[in-house]
Amino acid sequence: MERICAPRPSAPTAEALRALTRAHLEQVPFENLEIFRERRCPSLEPELLYRKVVEERRGGYCFELNKLFYLLLRELGYECRCAAARILYRRTDPRPLSHRLIVVSTADGGPWLCDVGYGGPGPKGALRMAPGKQTVAGETFEVREEDGVTVVYRHDPDGEQKLMAFRDEAAMEVDFDVLHGYFGWNPKSIFTQKLIAYRCTRDGMASLVADRFTLTRQGETVEEREISGEAELASVLESSFGLALPSAAG
């Protein structure tokens, strides 16, 4: 709990779930430094995930962050399951299963979609899996059921966009192991091709994609620049994401 700067909830309520999800998004960055920079496929063993994210204060991507958050929620008494999703945002070609997310039930509401490992355009807090638009941290989303599939829409200024789609059923850990093995190693994976880091702030988001750093506040871009050189990269990672720059693989 100290890692995400949140008090331990006295009961597994919807209010506590929303607070935990948001706290995680603000404190633990989405990042692929181990995959891209160190050229290693991260371990998904719980004790090694805990060491990396909690003790070493690193981040990770969906197969890491949503697994560790799922384990935390289970420990706190939440009823939850993990599902495999297809990422559809601004894509029209057929998309594979490539993402891990969490569905959480609470006695006082829900179910809830909790995703601390999407990054970028993903929801910046827990979403109710119920009809109707909902606003989270100033962004509007909608969850719909379409032919037995749950589809999450994001409402952008230029119109609604499909964000992701999944069947609301628990996937097996071995399924996530296979997906993680592909996206953590394959040279065609976006995570092996470029550096990516995201972190929510109180009123916006910091993002780093390849060499482009962007800072937004209340939906407006307040800073955008190209990162040049190792020293500047190290400075940005530390100041905006709380990360140290690991050495590149030889």
Image (cartoon, helix red, strand yellow):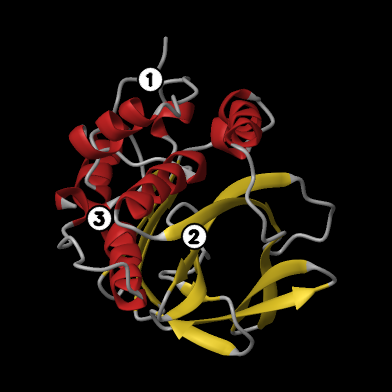
Q: Position of residue 206 (x, y in %)?
A: 34, 60
Q: Tell me what residue is drawn at x 58 percent, y 35 percent.
A: 173
Quarter of image, res 22: bottom left
From the viewer's perspective, tell me whether residue 225 is left or right of residue 135: left
In the displayed structure, would residue 134 be above or below residue 145?
below
Q: Position of residue 78 (x, y in %)?
A: 39, 60
Looking at the picture, tell me which residue is in the foreground, 91 or 49: 49
For label 2, the residue is 120
Viewer can see residue 22: yes
| Cβ atoms at labels 3 and 2 below 8 Å apart | no
Task: Bin the neighbour count of mark 3 within 10 Å (Cα to Cα): few under 14, some 14-19, many 20 and up.
Answer: some
Q: Amino acid at mark 3?
A: Gln
Viewer can see residue 212: no
Q: Secondary structure at mark 1?
A: loop
Tell me which numbered mark, 1 or 3, is placed earlier along the sequence.
3
From the viewer's perspective, tell me whether residue 103 is left or right of residue 187: left
Q: Tell me what residue is drawn at x 65 percent, y 29 percent.
A: 178
Q: CA distance from mark 3 to mark 2?
A: 15 Å
For label 3, the residue is 27
For label 1, the residue is 248
Q: Secondary structure at mark 3?
A: helix
Mark 1 vs mark 3: in front: 3
Quarter of image, res 158: bottom right
